[in-house]
Image: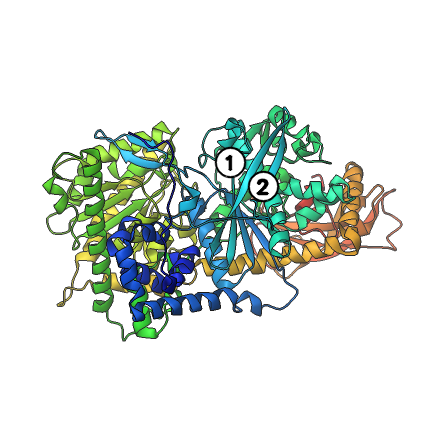
Amino acid sequence: MKAIRRFTVRALIPESLTALAALAANLRWSWHEPTQRLFDEIAPDIWRDTEHDPISGLGLVTPERLAELAADAEFVARADALHAELRDYLEGPRWYQGLPDPKPQSIAYFSPEFGIAAALPQYSGGLGILAGDHLKSASDLGVPLVGVGLLYRSGYFAQAITGDGWQQESYPVQDPDGLPVTVLREPDGTPVTVTLALPEDRTLNARVWIADVGRVPLLLLDTDIPENVAELRTVTDRLYGGGGEHRLLQELLLGIGGVRAIKQWSELTDHPLPQVYHSNEGHAGFLGLERISDLVGNGLSFDEALQLVRGGTVFTTHTPVPAGIDRFDRQVITRYFTGDLLPGVAPEEVLSLGDETANGGSPDVFNMAIMGLRLAQRANGVSKLHGAVSRAMFGGLWQGYDVAEVPITSVTNGVHAPSWTDPALIGFAEQRWGSADTSHADWADPSITDGDLWALKRGMRERLVTDVRRRISAGSRTENPNAVVPAWIDDLLDPDVLTIGFARRVPSYKRLTLMLRDPERLRAILLHPERPVQIVVAGKSHPADDDGKRLIQQLVQFSQDPQLRSRIVFLPDYGIGMAKTLYPGCDVWLNNPLRPLEACGTSGMKAALNGALNLSILDGWWDEFSDGENGWAIPTADGATNDDERDDLEAAALYEVIEHQLAPRYYERDADQVPTRWMHMVRHTMSTLSEPLSADRMVREYTERMYLPAAAMESRLNSSEQQGARDLAAYKRRVTDAWPQLAVAHVESGGVDEVPQVGDVLRLRAYVQLGSLTPDDVTVEVVCGVAGVGGELHDIRTQPLDWQESSSTSRPEHTLEFAGTLPLDRAGGFGYTVRIVPKHELLLSPAELGLVALATP
C-alpha cells in the first residue's frame, strides 16, 4: 500500500540541545567541518545514510540517544560553542565589509538551480553546483547577496540503472517541511504570496521559502499551493521538466516572480533593495522586464527604464552552443505579454529584446540568452576560452566590430574549497598550519614529505572504494530485495590501484564512451599485470536524451564483464553526496569533451583541490591552467575530416597517455614505495591551483570587475531623478536615428617611406560626414592590425583621431576633418582602416549600440 500523503515530523530537541536545531537550520553546516563532525557523532550511520542531512538525521535519532546527548555536558558545551561561532560568522565583518564605500548593500543573484547540499536537492549539474558555490563563497566573503530560485517538489530526478544498463528516472516528492527552508511570512503570520497575471484571466501564485546559506538568504518560489488550480500547481514540479509553455512559466516565475519576492522580502526584513542584479544564465532573463515595468510605472519611458536596468545588471552565459539556449515561439510570448503580466511593457518591446535575427537566427522565435545580453550592460562567459567562444557565438549582435571587441568578457568559474576538500586534507592543514584554509596552505612546504601526502591520498582512495562497494551493494538489495548480495561486490576496485574518475552530465558532446572507442585496448589497460588501472564513472542523461542514455548503457554493459567489473564501475544517481567521496578518491580526473564545447568543467577543479591530476582535452578551465606539471593534455585532432576520425584519433591519444606516461609514472616507486615523480605533480597542482580555482577568487573577481562597476553605473543613471538614464536614452535615440547619414568620405595618409620601417610614423587625415551629429557624439578612430588573407584585420588596436576645428580649405564639402599619427612599432604585415563609433560617458563600450561606420576600400 502507498501513503496518500507524506510529511516530515521534526524531532523534539531537548532544551539543552537547542543549539543543534540552530546549527541544522543554517546550511553553513554543509561546508563547516567542525559542525559536520558534531552531527556525525550523534549517529554515524544515520549521518551517512541521510547523505549528511542533519534535519532528516535528527528526525531519525531515538529519543533515548537525544536524552543521552543532553546529559553529556561536554557535547552540549561543544554544540553551544559552535552555535556561538556561527553567530559571530553571521554578524561579524568580513572581506567585503573592508572594501571602501560606496558599494552596494544588496546584490541579487538569480539561477534556475542551486546545488548547496544533498539535503536540498535543487540542482541537476554544473550550473547548479556553481550557483551554490557562488552563494557559499559570497557568504564567507561577506558579499551581501540574496539568491533567488525555484523550489522544485521533485528536484531533478533519481537515476536507477536496469539490468541491461538502461537509465530509469523517478521523481521522489520533496516535503518542504523536511528541507532546511522556512516560509516567508507577513507580520500576521500568513505566508507571503507572489502573483503573476496570466492569459485567459488565470493567476499564478507562488509561496516564498527561505534557505539560509550562511549569511546569504536564498528565496525559493513554490507553486504547489492551494491558491493555484491543479494545472498551475505543477509549474515548479521538476527542474527542467516539460517544455514549451511549462518551461516558459517556470522562467516567468523565476524572473518576474523572483523580483517581486525580493521586494516583499526586503520590505518585511528591512533589507535594502538590490542595486545590482546578476542573472546566472538566460533562464532568469525576465527579471529585467519586471524592473522595467516598475520604472515605467514611476514615470520613465521604456527606453529610459531599459538604460537604468541595463546599468545595474550582470549576465553570465554558460552555454557554448546555440542549441543549449532556451527559445520560445514569438506568438506565445506575445500572448503572455498582451495582458496584465507587466503593466507598461508592450509585447513588441519584449519581442525586440529576444529577437535573434541580427545574430543569424530565426524570425519566429524569442531567444532568452539574447534578451539577457540586451538587458545587461555587463556580460561574461565562464572561462577565457568560453569568453572567446561566446564573443564569436553572439558576435552578430555587434556587426561591424571585430570579434575581440564584442562586449562579453570572462570570469573563470571556481569551486568552494571548504565544500569540496576532503576532511582528511582539512584536518592535515589544521594540524600542520593551524588553519582549515587549504586554498592558501603551503603544499610545497619541504617539511611535508611525499610520504605524508601519499598516505593521505591512499586513505581517500580507500574511502572511495568502501563507498563504491556500499552503494553498489545497496543498489543490489533495492533491485533484488529477496536475493543474496553478490560476493563479487566485495572485490570492486582496489585502494592500491591507479584510479581514474569521470563524472558529469551525459550529453553527446561530453563523450562518455570515448574511452570505449577501442574496447580491447581499454581492457588491456585496465588489466595490465604490472600497472593496472581502475575507472569510476557516474553521470545522468537528460530524461528526453535517448542518445545519452545509450551511451550510459554501452558503458554499463562493458563494465558488466566478469573480468572487468572489479576495474570499471558505473555509479548510479550521481549527486553531491557521491561527489564528495569520488573527487578526493581519484588519482586522475578525466574530461574528454568535443573542444570547444565545454564552457568550464568545474569537476576537474574539485579533483585538483584534492590532489588529483587532470587528464583532459584543452577545453574550458583546463585550456588556461594546464602547464604540463599539473596533469596531461589530450591532443585535439582539429585536422580530422569527420567526427568518427576525430574520435578515433583522440581516443588513441588518450590510451597513449595512460599507457606510456600516466601509469608508468604512478607505479614508479622509491624505496618507501612512494611515487616521488607523481607526488611532485600532486604538490605542484595543490600549490599552484588551489587558490586560483577557488570560488573565493571567482566571487572577488565578480565583485571587483562586475558588481562594483555595475553599482556605480546604476548610481549615475539613477541620480537626479534618473536624469542619467533619460540622457542616455535620448542620446541612443538620436544617434540611432542619425546613423544612416554617417560616412567616412575620404582618408589620406603620409609620412612613411616607400618601404615602411619600424619607427616610422604614419600621418592620417580622415574626412567624415556626421549628418545631424556633432564631434562630441562620436569617436573617429584608426583601426590597425595584421592584415590577413582577404585584407581582414587581426590582433587589432585602435587610436582616436582628433577633430580639426580649423580644418583645411581643401576638405570635401559637408565633411569634418579628423587627423592624427600612428607609430609603426612592430614588423610584419600591417593594415588599417578608419571608422566612426558612438561616444558617450555612460557607454561601457563603443560597441554597445552595435553601430559602426567604416571607411570603404
The correct choice, above or below, for 420 with respect to 92 in the image is: above
Q: Which of the image's four quarters has the N terminus?
A: top left
Q: Which residue shows up at 47% across the image and 66% down it?
A: 87
Q: Position of residue 424 (x, y in %)?
A: 28, 63
Any part of residue 681 in sight: no
> With 308 as the anchor, is 583 left or right in this view?
left
Q: Which residue is mark 2?
A: 193
Which color mode does the image show? rainbow
The correct choice, above or below, for 162 with respect to 502 in the image is: above
Give the image quarter of residue 440: bottom left
Label 1 crowd bin: few (<14), some (14–19), many (20+), radius 10 Å: some
Q: Which residue shows up at 32% across the image and 59% down it?
A: 39
Q: Which residue is mark 1?
A: 225
Q: Position of residue 245 (x, y in %)?
A: 54, 27
The amino acid type, in three-letter code, at marker 1 is Ile
> With 225 as the anchor, is 845 left or right in this view?
right
Kind of element beneath mark 1: loop
Q: Earlier in the sequence, mark 2 or mark 1?
A: 2
- Nearer the observer, 508 or 178: 178
The amino acid type, in three-letter code, at marker 2 is Thr
Q: Are marks 2 and 1 in contact (CB under 8 Å)?
A: yes
Label 2 crowd bin: few (<14), some (14–19), many (20+), radius 10 Å: many
> With 293 as the anchor, is 191 left or right in this view?
left
Q: Which of the image's four quarters has the C terminus?
A: top right
Any part of residue 114 in sight: yes
Kind of element beneath mark 2: strand
